[in-house]
């Protein structure tokens, strides 16, 4: 119970601290992206054998809404900054998350990714 409350409070703090203004000409604001993938935080801190359905639904939703190169670069930048602001994430689980959710990305999500190179 306390763990669930901690995750919810962390999500709210993250949303307040990280960019919540819309990305220029982007399909989603960073705040929207964060809310959509927030169900993944628990899994990324303590990966289990399978990714929770709400997490994968969020990952697929963000991927489906980011249709242009600028949109994808904006999502990448948002996820990168969010990753840097959340301690305790399992980085190998983060890198594998899209594939586990059935999303094919030609790059791995990580705190060191250069989002300007994202073209897909």
Image: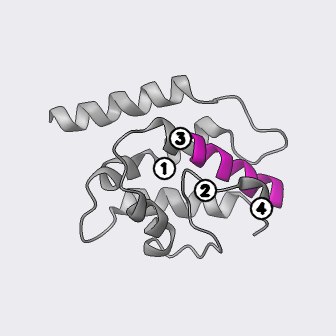
Q: Is residue 2 above or below residue 43?
A: above
Give, as a single range, the part of the protein colored magenta.
67-82
Residue 6 occupies quadrant = top left
Residue 29's mark?
A: none
Indicate yes or no whether the magenta region holds residue 44: no
Q: Alpha-carbon distance for marks 1 and 2?
A: 8 Å
In the rendered image, residue 79, in percent from the top left (x then y), is placed at 58, 48
In the rendered image, residue 26, in percent from the top left (x then y), is placed at 78, 46
Q: CB of mark 1 within 8 Å of CB of mark 3?
A: no
Instruction: Name the element at disc 3.
Output: helix
Q: Which residue is mark 4?
A: 117
Q: Residues within 10 Å of mark 3 (few under 14, many from 20)?
A: many
In the rendered image, residue 40, in percent from the top left (x then y), is placed at 39, 52
At horizontal 16% and vertical 32% (from top left) the residue drawn is 2
Quadrant position of the N terminus in the picture: top left
Q: Is residue 26 above or below residue 43?
A: above
Residue at the extreme right: 25
Q: Which residue is mark 2?
A: 62
Instruction: Name the element at disc 1.
Output: helix
Which of pointers 4 and 1 indicates the residue nearer the eye? Answer: 4
Depth check, front residue: 69 or 32 = 69
Q: Is residue 67 above or below residue 74?
A: below
Q: Alpha-carbon distance for marks 4 and 2?
A: 19 Å
Q: Which residue is mark 3?
A: 82
Q: Residues within 10 Å of mark 2 (few under 14, many from 20)?
A: many
In the rendered image, residue 42, in percent from the top left (x then y), is placed at 31, 49
Q: Is residue 111 above or below residue 14?
A: below
């Amino acid at each position: 119970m306390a763990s669930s409350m901690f995750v919810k409070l962390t999500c709210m703090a993250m949303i307040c601290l990280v960019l919540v203004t819309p990305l220029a000409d982007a399909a989603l604001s960073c705040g929207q992206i964060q809310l959509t993938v927030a169900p993944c935080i628990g899994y990324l801190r303590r990966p289990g054998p399978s990714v929770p359905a709400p997490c994968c639904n969020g990952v697929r939703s963000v991927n489906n809404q980011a249709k242009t190169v600028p949109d994808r670069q904006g999502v990448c930048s948002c996820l990168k900054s969010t990753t840097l602001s959340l301690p305790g994430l399992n980085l190998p689980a983060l890198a594998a998350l899209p594939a586990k959710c059935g999303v094919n990305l030609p790059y791995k999500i990580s705190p060191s990714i250069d989002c300007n190179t994202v073209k897909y």
